[in-house]
Amino acid sequence: MDTSNLLLIGTFVMILAGGIMAYVISLHSQSKVRDTNYQQAMKAIDGVIAVSDRVSDKEFLTASLSELKWMPGVKNVWINYSHCSFIQLDEECKVLEHERDRVITHVLESKNSCMRFDNYQLLSLPIIHKGEVVVIFTLQLKLEPAKDQIMLTRSIAQAIWQGMLRKHRNKKIREHEVFLSAATEQGGVGLFDWNLRTHCVQYSDVFLCQLGFTAEELKPHIASWTSCVNPEDLKVAKAYIDERLRFKARELTCDFRVTNKRGIELWMRVQASVFYNHKREAYRIVGAQMDISGQKDAEDRLLEERDQAQRLASRNDTILSSISDGIIEVDTTGKQVFINKAAASILGYPAEFLMGRNIEETWYRPSKIVKGHFDVDLDIFTALSTGEASDSDDWFVAANEHQIPVHRKVSPIYTDGAVSGAVISFYDIAQEVENTRAMKLSAAVYQNTAEGILITNSENKIVSVNPAFERITGYTSDEVIGQGPELLASSLTPDAVYKDLWGSLASKGSWKGELINRRKDGREFTELLSITTLKDDFSEQYYIGVLNDISKVKETQEQLAQLANHDRLTGIPNKFFFESLVGHLIEKDKRFKRKSALLYLDMDRFKNINDSMGHDYGDQLIIDCAQRLSGQIRDMDYCARLGGDEFAVFVDDYESEEDVYALADRLIQVISAPYNLEGCTSHIGMSIGIAFYPRDGRNLEELKRAADVALYKAKADGRGVYRTYSADMSDMAKERLELETMLREAMANDDLTLHYQPQVDIHTGKTIGFEALSRWQHSEQGFISPGKFIPLAEETGLISDLGRWALMRAAKQLKEWIDMKMEIGYVAVNVSALQLARTDLVADVKTAIAKYSIPASMLELEITESFLVHDPDKAADVLHELKALGVRISIDDFGTGFSSLGYIKDLPCDCIKIDQSFIRSITEEESDRSLVKAIIAMSKGLGLGVIAEGVETPEQVDLLRTLGCPVVQGWYYGKPRSPEAFNPPAKSTESMVA
């Protein structure tokens, strides 16, 4: 860019800056001029403002106009627009009001210019307040003013408006002072101003006049004022003021009595305001004091008159409230103006709810035409319109939606000969309606009830019967009326019953009992008869009898008694009836000093038969057993089934204990005889425990405990015997309970172990398998024999859990031996009959095989022969399922069963174990030797293996080898030992290195 261009731009910038500077100086000059003009204008009209509150708005504007004389041709000035709510301008100031809209539009569109008319011009000057035009001054001019004149005029207008505000403010203050002065003088209100710091008080003239003192007589100190106040009221007033000041209250109001200069006591009321400084400290109380003595006198008179009115009203209310009838008063519009207590109670509404409401809102009745609708066409309005009274019965709906019947009377009230209201009196007739309904209902019941009813007079002659009586007895009413009730009598009712009947009627007026009467056709029936004596209003006496035919009920009761007291399966007494009867007999034996005995009986081996043969078979066995027992006792003795396979016999008044023992022997023998049921022969035994009264017990509970202990002793001694109670047996029973508890704990804590006994090839002496046997080493009592805890487990049902545990433990051990590369052949586990009958043995075996991943062929299950004999069909199904898994199956305790050996050929068995009871005496008893020889020969013929268990001597081994028994097991080859005893020896470190 060349130098000339730069010079040109610089010159332009300087000119622009100079213009801006000149404009700013001009604005500042104009502002300064406006301020100067405003100050001059205010100074010029100060004299006018000083007297503005004493002249009218028009006069104020006219006076201010003199300050505008310098403007050409100023004729008038108006305020023709104002938004100020706090200034009410004189109407003569609004001469141009009709030009308001035009003037406003002009002011908003073009400022500082005049509106031209024919002979004059108007200059309108707006006053702006908070951005809004609130006032417009209008000046009437002959010539158009210059701009500086307009600016000066605007400043004067602003000053005039401020003067107008001050004028109205001063005017209102003066008006308020005048009003306050007039109000206090006319209203008798005395004013005071109490300085709380100096306790000086300024009083108004009215205040001094109230007390009758002059300003010189009543000192300007609070003590002078309080000396006139009643001491009691002063104490209350001080406490009140202190409390209000403590809570920083801004207003005080209190009443107290003062004594004026003439000694007259007056009531005064003070209402005051409290003033606080910036520290929230009260420093001034300003208020008014008013004489309320006349008001207090009026209040006292009103209170007295009110008390008199209340006493009169209370008396009237007491009278009306004591009336049982409901009373309601209504005016001519039907509005309820009075309700007594009874009316509210009957209708169910609070009296406050009813007062002032129209009668139609709370008094209505159900429609007789449309169900669920209500009528309000009451005859109350008829009485109000016609002046005629009414009297009627009606139904109405109470507050709880219940329908109530009432008798209602409506009476009009006359005032100056015209109806001014009505009084409704009514009362609840529900009882009367209910009595009528009850009479109808009683008649209906009498005719339709299922119970027979007969009524006899004082001469005991029948005067009335109902249809049910005719149906029950077969007699018609014509046949029995006039007759005596004895025509129904039979000879089966004892005379003592009739004697009790008449005695009870004479003493109590009623009787209830059973009679056996005869119908018209001669059939007897049992009736339950209730008789009540009744006297009518004429003192005539009647007997009302209600009878029910209970013949079928008696039959049912007898059947229920039979069911409740007798065992449903066997028909003999049950436990409840037996113990109740025995308890009664023992008390009788105490009185007559007689001896008796209680026998507890338990069927031996019944659980095995019931589980293997089925419950139907077991039930029939119990029925036969009960029949055999009942056939062996005397008529005076009692036999009962206590539950399951347990029975009891009570022998009453025996002569010798030997007779009881003989009975026990007979019972054992008769029960032990074979049972032929459903084509199958079974054998059971019977164990008996005997307790004698009074030797073994003085009451039923002691005898029961003694007999139970004796029964346990009989079972422990081999079963099939009887035992009597002795004190030592209680220790045995306690020991058995403790053993059962310990066994449960041992199974829960896994304290049992398995020992293993080898099964040996008789020719080579090589171990071909092991039998797993449960062993129990107690931490305190030491070794507990299986012969002791296994039978206990079978009795208590724990054998199922014990068998499942043994199966899983043996499978685990088999897995460990397989992992050790031992040549063990197989492991045999015993399975009880109860485990076979009550558990899913197949599922348990599957679980064991899968859990430990063992070959099924290395697991052998030893099944007891008793299970096979008693339920061969179920045994075959279970064995085939097990065989399908691949496990080995052997028949344990073979030879102890009660049936033919031929069933073995149809079962999938691998081996037969000859019971040790035959091996024990094989070298001495020819019969045992022959039986063992036959079992071996039969097994070989069926292709089954044979194991002889319980082998203990070389002689037994030689004989079994001669008889051809291939495998033996017993102490001769080794006792059962822990699995660690059979583990292969660990290789030495040296051999491992080598």
Image: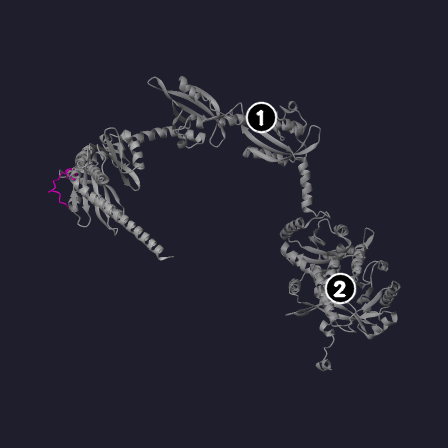
Residue type at the position of mark 1: Ala
Return the x and y of residue 671 as percentages of the image width and height. Answer: 77, 55
Magenta span: predominant SS is loop
Q: Position of residue 28 (x, y in %)?
A: 25, 48
- Tell me the amino acid under the disc marked 2: Asn
Visual colour scheme: one colour
Tell me the element at label 2: strand
Q: Relative to 33, does residue 355 appear above or below in the rendering?
A: above
- For residue 678, side relative to residue 105 (left or right): right
Mark 1 residue element: helix
Is 731 on the left-hand or right-hand side of 301? right
Quadrant that contains the C terminus = bottom right
Q: Which mark is residue 443?
A: 1
| Count of numbered circles on the image | 2
- Is residue 413 visible in the rendered image? The answer is yes
Q: Nearer the viewer, mark 2 or mark 1?
A: 2
Which residue lies at the image location 66% right of the left edge and 31% below the top edge? 489
Name the residue that disc number 2 marks: 830
Q: Magenta segment, which residues?
A: 206-220
Q: Position of residue 448 (x, y in %)?
A: 62, 28
Q: Is residue 71 magenta?
A: no
